[in-house]
Amino acid sequence: MNKAIFLDRDGTINVDFGYVYKTQELELLPGVAEALRIFQELGYLLIVITNQSGIGRGYFTLEDAEQFNRALAQELEKHGVILNDFYTCPHVPEEHCECRKPSPFMVTEAMKKYEIDPSQSYMFGDKKSDTECGERSGVKSFRVTSEHSLLYWANQLKNNLL
């Protein structure tokens, strides 16, 4: 079985300007490329799990979100990082869909597709819904904050402290 790092997108990998979809606004958070490289070197698949309610609100399209995801993947490739997949929920919270975090749906779908062992996997995100999603999926989950950046967590994992 494989192991994976599940990652929220906006506010965890890139700066969250609110309804992020314009590729010209793509800005990696400090230390993210290095953190993802550490995870990758440790043998983890890197899978992005993102709620994008701006699609459901009509602010941008699914194609806009996918274009942003491609730009993000290309930017990280410049740093030697390969994102293995993106899972996107396009719904607004009021729709009560099955895929929107904190539902574990997107993570469990990725686990099936990539044969991922939840006991060897982690979820990182900047919101409570991210960590709840991870916990409901059976993976260890940690909050990304200004004090505990993604790079902090990558170094913790690298040093066997998680």
Image: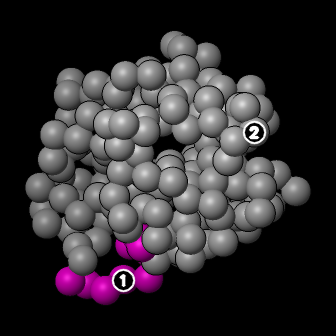
Pinpoint residue 123: horizontal percent, then vertical percent.
Answer: 56, 55
Viewer-closest of 43 and 98: 43
Q: Residues within 10 Å of mark 1 (few under 14, many from 20)?
A: some
Left or right of 1 in this view: 77: left
Residue 162's disc number: none
Q: Which residue in the structure is indicated by mark 1? A: 97
| Residue that appears at 24% across and 77% down | 93
| Residue that appears at 13% across and 66% down | 57
Viewer-closest of 113 and 4: 4
Q: Which residue in the structure is indicated by mark 2? A: 160
Is residue 141 among the parts visible in the rendering?
Answer: yes
Which secondary structure, mark 1? loop
Which residue lies most toward the top here? 78
Which secondary structure, mark 2? loop
Residue 130 belongs to magenta span: no
Tag 1: residue type? Cys
- Give the quadrant of residue 129: bottom left
Tag 2: residue type? Asn
Q: Quadrant of the N terminus?
A: bottom right
Pinpoint residue 51: horizontal percent, then vertical percent.
Answer: 34, 61
Q: How many marks?
A: 2
Q: Residues within 10 Å of mark 2 (few under 14, many from 20)?
A: few
Please report the bounds of the magenta region as a residue range: 94-102
| Residue that appears at 66% across and 72% down | 138
Q: Main secondary structure of the magenta part?
A: loop
Pinpoint residue 119: horizontal percent, then vertical percent.
Answer: 77, 63
Q: CA distance from mark 1 to mark 2?
A: 37 Å
